[in-house]
Image (tube, rainbow, N blue to C red):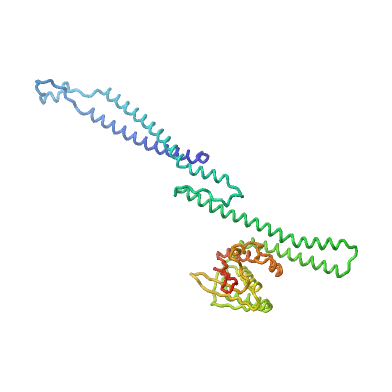
Amino acid sequence: MLKKMSIRMRLTILSVLLLSICCVGLTAILNISANRMVDVIEATPILPSMEAGEMPLTDAARTNPAKISSIPSENSQLARQNFRHQSVLYMIVIVMAGGGLTYVISGRALKPLQALSCQIKNRTVHNLSEDLKMPPTKDEIADLTSAFNEMSHKLDNAFSMQKRFSQSAAHELRTPLAVLKTKVDVFKKKSSHTPEEYDRLLTVISTHTDRLSNLVQDLLDLTSTDALVYDETIALKHLLLEIIEELSLLTERNKVTLVLHGAEQTVLGNKSLLRRAFYNLIENAIKYNQEDGNVDITLATQEGNTVVTISDTGIGIPQEMRELIFEPFFRVDKSRSRQMGGAGIGLSIVKSIIDQHHGEITVTKSECGGSIFKVTL
């Protein structure tokens, strides 16, 4: 029943109940005290009045019941009833007045909450970025307004990210499909084809089918890391050395020098996922580097955490894009990324893996203009 009522009515009802309990208890105590006082008065003997010049009563007269009168019991009973009735009446008046006053005061106290409710009802996807007006008070309603504004900004960022993701995903999927459709349509216009034309068509179909397959697999990898085990003991330096060995051909082809610094560090996590995360970071540092460039990998400990820093002398990332590079399909240099076969999902997968390990990844600019990726585990 109470759950269906407004907070104002709940406060009023609870206040009335509390006030009623207090008033009933106080009234009962007052009636008991009054009855005891009347009993004491009734038991006290009262001497008859004397006129001027009359002789004082003797001791015998004082103890003679005939000479002594007492308060009539009928008057005392009537006084008790009047006191009882009046106390009950005053109790009812106080409870009603207290309930009404509580209703009015609670209404004024909850007025900012009603205003906040009206503002929240007018919120839509299109005005989530606008802040609610903060009340002048520093109470819980102000804290609630501040929390709602913070939540609105997070939702607005989430909706914007989802919109960018949908647009990018549609574009990435549309491009290979459009190429396949064009090639097939052109192929169908000719009635006869040479073996070389069949081979070229099959090559295009195979290439773009692989691209679509890899794209779908990358999207699945973004959401398939929750059910894995993260309690393996991993020697990070050994893992990084294996990755460097695997990428040795790429470093030779791109003429990039790769150096690992620091002592061995061990962490708990999923080895295959961390291998993929660091592989993507190091591979990007090599791919997007300059000729005769360098990639420095450093292992260190900071405040009890293991820190892996990957610094390169590459093209760098503009300041305004550093918060967006971990979104799916985002590319700093779209043309260069396409030439290297990237779909813009690698760093999103890296961010997802680091988050699953309760870690943090940040990117800053290096002194030579390249990028520094810092992973804290």
Name the residue at the right extreme. Answer: 192
Q: Is residue 268 above or below residue 178?
A: below
Percent x, y for residue 376? 54, 68
Q: Nearer the viewer, residue 149 or 93?
A: 149
Residue 46's quadrant in the figure? top left
Vertical placement of residue 84 versus 293, above or below:
above
191 on left or right of 283: right
Residue beneath the point at 65% across and 55% down: 163
Q: Quadrant of the C terminus?
A: bottom right
| Residue at horizontal 78 percent and vertical 62 percent from the top | 179
- Is 140 rendered above or below residue 221? above
Q: Nearer the viewer, residue 219 or 373?
A: 373
The percent position of residue 158, horizontal first and vertical second, equals: 60, 56
> Residue 152 location in percent, x, y?
56, 52
Q: Nearer the viewer, residue 326 or 85?
A: 326
x 29%, y 33%: residue: 33
Q: In the rendered view, does 149 fall on the left or right side of 334?
A: left
Q: Quadrant location of residue 94?
A: top left
